[in-house]
Image: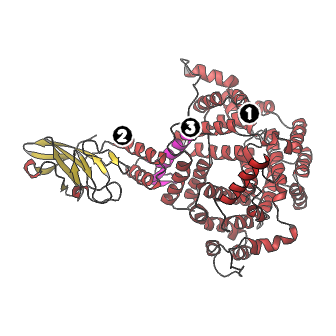
Amino acid sequence: MKSDWIDLGPLSEFPAEQPVLRKDDAGRRFACVLRGGEVHALDDRCPHQGYPLSQGALRGGVLTCAWHNWKFDIATGACSFGGEPVRRYATRVDGGRVQLNRAVDTAAEVRRLVAGLREAILRDEPARALREGLRLGALGLHRAETGLGSLHLAFEVLARDGAERAEHGFDHGLALLADLCTWIERGWVPTEEAFVVAVHAVGEASARLGPRGKGPGKAGGRSPLARIADFELDEPEKVSEALAAERRDEAEARMRELVEVRGVAGARRALMPFVAQHLHDYGHGAIFLAKALELAGRFSGAADEVLAASTVQLAWATADTSLPPFAATRAALARVAELPLPGPEAAAASAASVASVAEAAAAPAVSASTRAAPLDPAERAAFEAEVLAGERPAVEATVRWLARGAGPLALLGAIGHAAALRLARFDPAWEQRLDADVGVLDVTHAVTFAEAAAALGREALPREAAQLAVLAAGFVGKLRAADVAHAAHAAHVAHAAAPAGTAARAPGGTLLQAAEARDVGGALAIARELDAAGRRRAFAELAPFAAFDAAVRPIFTAHAVKTLEALHRLESSDPQPDGAYLEALLTYLVPVRRELNARRIAAVARKFMSDGRPPEGLY
C-alpha cells in the first residue's frame, strides 16, 4: 500500500478530548481527536446516515454521533452502539504538525467491510447490509462484466453466509436470491432494492444463528491426487447412500470435498439419483437443488457452501412419495425402472469415447431420448387432460408415453402447462376454511417443481429424467382437489379474488396498474388481449411488483418471485405457448392474501388437541 500523507495543521490547534473537523484539498472530512498524546482520525461522516461526527460528544475515548447516538471507539473505529464501524485513518506528528495518511489498505478494508456485511446479515439489518455492500463495491474489486454491478461481491457474501448458517440447509431465502440475481441481470429489477429484499429473506430465516455444524471431512493427510483417485471410484454414489441413511454430517462432508475435486457438475451428478427417486418436501428437494446449482454456477467462491446446504436440505427432507397417499406414483416409478431406457453405464461409456475418464464421471450425460421432439397438439392436449384428472391417470399416462418413446422433457413441458392450469383453477375457498391446512402456495409448488424437474432433466440421465416426469405428473394430479368447481371457474377468475367493493373492468390501464390495484378481473382482461411477445413482456413488467409489493413476509415474497420465474421459463420453453402461464400468475399474484392466519392456526391447534387428528388437506 502506497502512503498518501497530508498535513492537517499544527498540533497546538487540536484541543485535548474534543473532536475537531479537518478537510483535505478535495473536501474530504475527518473527525480528529487528541487524546493521550495521540491524534485519532475517523471519517467525519457517520456510517449510519452521514451526519458529522466532529459535532459529536467524546466521553472516555468513545465518540457519540449527536443525531442518532451511535457510538464509536476512536482508537479502533468499532461501533459499540448502532451499527457498522467507521473508517479510521493513521496519523503521526512530525515537527509539531499533524499528518494523516489517506491511503486505504484495500485488503484490510475488504476484511472490515465483509465482516460488517456478515454481521448485518446475521442481525437481519438490510439497510446496514446495503451500506456495507455499497462500500465494498466502491473499492472497485468486482468484475466489470458481471450483471450484478458493484454489488457482485456483496451478493456472493450473502450467498455464502446464508448457505453457511441455514440451520436445516438450503431454504427459500437462498432460492429467492438466485432468482433475484437473474432478474437483475435481465434488467427486470434494480440492484439495490433486490439486494435489500434478498438480505431480509436470508437474514430473517437464520437471524443470530451461527454457522451450521459441519461434519469432519475425510481428507486427513491425503494428497490431492490421492483424493481425486478416491473420488473417481466411489464418491458420487456414497453421497446418495449417506443421504438415504440420513447420515447428514457425512453427506455434507462428502459434498464439500466433491465440489472441491469435481466442481458443480460433479455435485449435480452425485445428487441427481437421490432427487429423482422421490418427491421430497412437497417438491422443495428438486426446486432448491435447481436454484443451488444456479447460485453455485454464478458465485464460484460460494459453491461449496451452497451445494453443501442443498445436501443438508435433502438429508432432512421428507420423501413424500414414500407415504401411503402416493401409492400410484410409486407403482409408476417401479414400471419406469423396467423400461428399456439408457442407463448410467451406457451413458458413461458414450461420454468416455469423447472425454477422459475423469471428465466422463463429472459431466452430465444427455441422450437423444431425453430431448425428443414435443408431442403434437392433439397428443399433448390428451396427455394434459389425464395429468389434470388425478394422480393415478397422470402417472399411468406418463409411463405409457415414455414406453412409446416420448422424451421426458417433452412430457415435462406438457406437465408444466398442466400445472399452470391447476394454479389458475385454485379455489380460494380453501383459504377461508379454518379446519384445513391448505393455501395457494401449496399449488404453486406444482408449477415450480415441474419447472425445476425440466431444468434438472436437461442434464440428467434418461432414466432420471423419466422419473422426474412421473413425479411431476403425479404431483400435479394429486392436487386436483384444489380446483374450484368447473362451473364456477369463470366467475372465480373474474370476481372471487378481487378486493371487496371492486369489479372486473375492461382493458384500459396497464397490466401493472391492474395488479397494483389488486384487480384480478381487470388484469386478466388485459392479459387476454396480449400476443406471445406481449405476454413475455408482462412477466418483466410484473417482476418488481412480485419482488417488492405483492407480499410482506419473506416466505410469501419468495413464492411470488419463484412462481413468476417458473411460469416465465415454462412459457419461454413451450413450443405451443398460450395464455395459461400468465393467467396462472395473475390469479395467484394479484389478490391480497392473508399472510398470517391466526384464526386458522388457533382452530387447527384446538382441533388437534381435541381429537388428535390432522387437519383437512388436499389428499
Q: Give the side of residue 133 with respect to residue 420, left or right.
A: left
Tell me what residue is drawn at x 21 percent, y 50 percent. Answer: 58
Residue type beneath disc 2: Ala
Dot 1, crowdedness within 10 Å: few (<14), some or many (≥20)? some
Badge nearest the viewer, 1 or 3: 3
The magenta-colored residue range is 142-168
The residue carrying mark 2 is 107
**Where does residue 372 sit, x and y in percent of width and height?**
82, 49
Badge nearest the viewer, 3 or 2: 3
**Where does residue 313 sit, x and y in percent of width and height?**
65, 39
Snapshot quadrant of residue 46: bottom left
Mark nearer the N terminus (2 vs 1): 2
Dot 3, crowdedness within 10 Å: few (<14), some or many (≥20)? many
Residue type beneath disc 1: Ala
Residue type beneath disc 3: Glu
Tell me what residue is drawn at x 55 percent, y 36 percent. Answer: 212
Tell me what residue is drawn at x 78 percent, y 66 percent. Answer: 578
Identify the disc placed on residue 361: none
Residue furthest to the top: 221
Mark nearer the N terminus (3 vs 2): 2
How far, Cα to Cα, is label 2 from label 1? 44 Å
The residue carrying mark 1 is 351
The residue carrying mark 3 is 305
Dominant secondary structure (helix, strand or loop) of the stretch shown in magenta: helix
Dot 2, crowdedness within 10 Å: few (<14), some or many (≥20)? few
Mark nearer the N terminus (1 vs 3): 3
